[in-house]
Amino acid sequence: MNAPLTRSTSDKFIGGVCGGLARSLGMDSGIVRILVVLIALFTQIGWVAYLVMWAVLPLEPGGPTGVDEAKKFFGGGSGKVPNSDDLR
């Protein structure tokens, strides 16, 4: 492996997973994308693997994960735990 496994910010088509995986493996991102699509079409595990990698891998360098981005997009993830005063 040449680089740490992160999602790419510059070589991305949907979520940057294939671009980051290609950079980490030292391969062309087009080949990785074709392989991921073929695996997804023929085994159905590719979709799940892509979504899990999107959710877990941070953006390069040290950015948010996909779950963090989704929380921000949907208005959640303030990080504040409600106390009894907030519930009144």
Image (tube, rainbow, N blue to C red):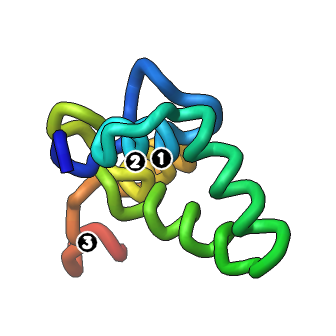
What amino acid does circle 2 point to? Leu
Residue underneath mark 1: 17
Disc 2 to disc 3, how far (Cα)?
38 Å
Three-letter amino acid code of the residue under disc 3: Pro
Write the residue at 25% across / 71% down: 82
Label 3: element kind: loop
Q: Measuring from the top left, give residue 7's x and y in whole percent.
A: 37, 42
Residue 8 in picture, x, y percent from top left: 38, 32
Q: Residues within 10 Å of mark 1 (few under 14, many from 20)?
A: many
Q: Marks 1 and 3: in contact by CB < 8 Å?
A: no
Q: Disc 2 vs disc 1: Cβ atoms closer than 8 Å?
A: yes
Residues packed near mark 3 inside 10 Å, few (<14), some (14 to 19) or many (20 plus): few
Question: In the rendered structure, which disc, 2 or 3, sits on the residue that comes first in sequence?
Answer: 2
**Residue under numbered circle 2:** 21
Q: Which SS class for mark 2? A: helix
Label 2 crowd (10 A; few <14 / some 14-19 / many >=20): many
Picture quadrant where residue 51 is located: bottom right
Q: Earlier in the sequence, mark 3 or mark 1?
A: 1
Residue under label 3, please give it. Answer: 82
